[in-house]
């Protein structure tokens, strides 16, 4: 049974997965540009301060894919390894500790095959191995196979690692603290004089409302007169009921 990473935070065990930008961009492009499931491996380093793990690079192997499955072939892994130089082989053996793949548009929930593959890939390591599942929506399901505490630890977040960004964040926080102040407002005593803003003033609130009410009434009356004046008497006699009544009166 898997343990959620947050449950181990208070014990100082941090299962945060960081990516260098280029490694992250490569992974996202694998997912974006392939219409089917696709798998990759990655190099991982455990951060010295114990804050998590960092993916430094990812790469593809020869593989056959389908809309719903992808499997890593042992033959493809050996072919890749054999094409490396001595330094590359050493790096592969010590740092290749990530298996990632896409579920295309489906949720990144591990399938039975995903569990079997993760168990197989992690069985030969002494410390940890990481399985990552993602999709085109950018959702994640990440499992750490921690051999030290003998547990599977799960999380759903990846973080872009940027030392420069961390330092810049601190600088900006200090700059905001120094230069940006919250505006405060004071309550003033209401005045008993009301003005229009054009030189007129009123000695009381009642005078103000009386004046505006009278102006409004005058405008309403003028509007009604204007509307009545627009009525065309010829339009009324075009209606059949008015015309019939008029003819009846003429015949009397």
Image (cartoon, rainbow, N blue to C red):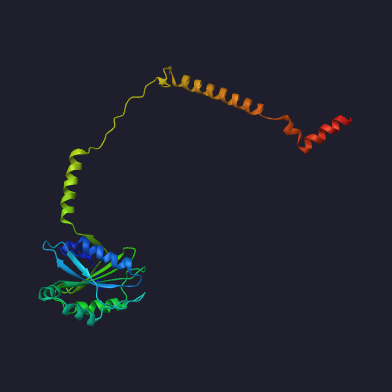
Q: Residue furthest right?
A: 252
**Count of marks, rendered view:** 0
Seen from the viewer's position, the closer of residues 81 and 110 is: 81
Instruction: Using residue 161 as the reference point, say whether residue 38 is left or right of it.
Output: right
Q: Position of residue 136 (x, y in %)?
A: 34, 65
Q: Which of the image's four quarters has the N terminus? A: bottom left
Residue 188: quadrant of the picture? top left
Residue 214: quadrant of the picture? top right
Classify 61 as above or below 180.
Answer: below
Classify 188 as above or below 139.
Answer: above
Q: Which of the image's four quarters has the C terminus? A: top right
Q: Position of residue 131 (x, y in %)?
A: 24, 72
Q: Position of residue 20 (x, y in %)?
A: 19, 62
Classify 213 as above or below 175.
Answer: above
Q: Residue at x 42, y 20 (%)?
A: 198
Seen from the viewer's position, the closer of residues 194 and 72 is: 72
* Res. 162 in view: yes
Classify 120 as above or below 218.
Answer: below
* Res. 129 in view: no
Q: Residue at x 59, y 27 (%)?
A: 223
Instruction: Using residue 26 as the reference point, say whether residue 48 is left or right of it.
Output: left
Q: Residue furthest bottom?
A: 75
Q: Position of residue 85 (x, y in %)?
A: 12, 76
């Amino acid at each position: 049974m898997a343990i959620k990473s947050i449950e181990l935070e208070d014990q100082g065990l941090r299962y945060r997965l960081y990516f260098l930008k280029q490694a992250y961009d490569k992974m996202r492009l694998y997912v974006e540009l392939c219409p089917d499931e696709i798998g990759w491996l990655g190099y991982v380093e455990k951060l010295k301060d114990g804050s998590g793990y960092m993916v430094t690079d990812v790469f593809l192997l020869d593989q056959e894919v389908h809309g719903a499955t992808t499997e890593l072939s042992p033959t493809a892994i050996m072919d890749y390894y054999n094409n490396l130089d001595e330094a590359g082989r050493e790096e592969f053996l010590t740092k290749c500790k990530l298996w990632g793949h896409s579920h295309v548009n489906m949720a990144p929930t591990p399938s039975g095959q995903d569990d079997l593959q993760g168990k197989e890939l992690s069985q030969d390591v002494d410390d940890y191995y990481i399985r990552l599942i993602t999709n085109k929506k950018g959702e994640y399901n990440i499992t750490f196979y921690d051999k030290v505490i003998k547990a599977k630890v799960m999380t759903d977040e990846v973080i872009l690692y940027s030392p420069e960004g961390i330092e810049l964040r601190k600088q900006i926080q200090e700059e905001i603290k120094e230069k940006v102040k919250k505006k405060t407002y004071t309550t003033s005593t209401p005045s008993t004089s009301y003005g229009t803003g054009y030189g007129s003033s009123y000695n009381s609130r009642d005078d103000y409302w009386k004046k505006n009410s009278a102006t409004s009434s005058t405008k309403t009356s003028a509007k009604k007169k204007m509307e009545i004046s627009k009525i065309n008497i010829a339009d009324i006699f075009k209606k059949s009921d008015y015309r019939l009544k008029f003819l009846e009166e003429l015949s009397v």
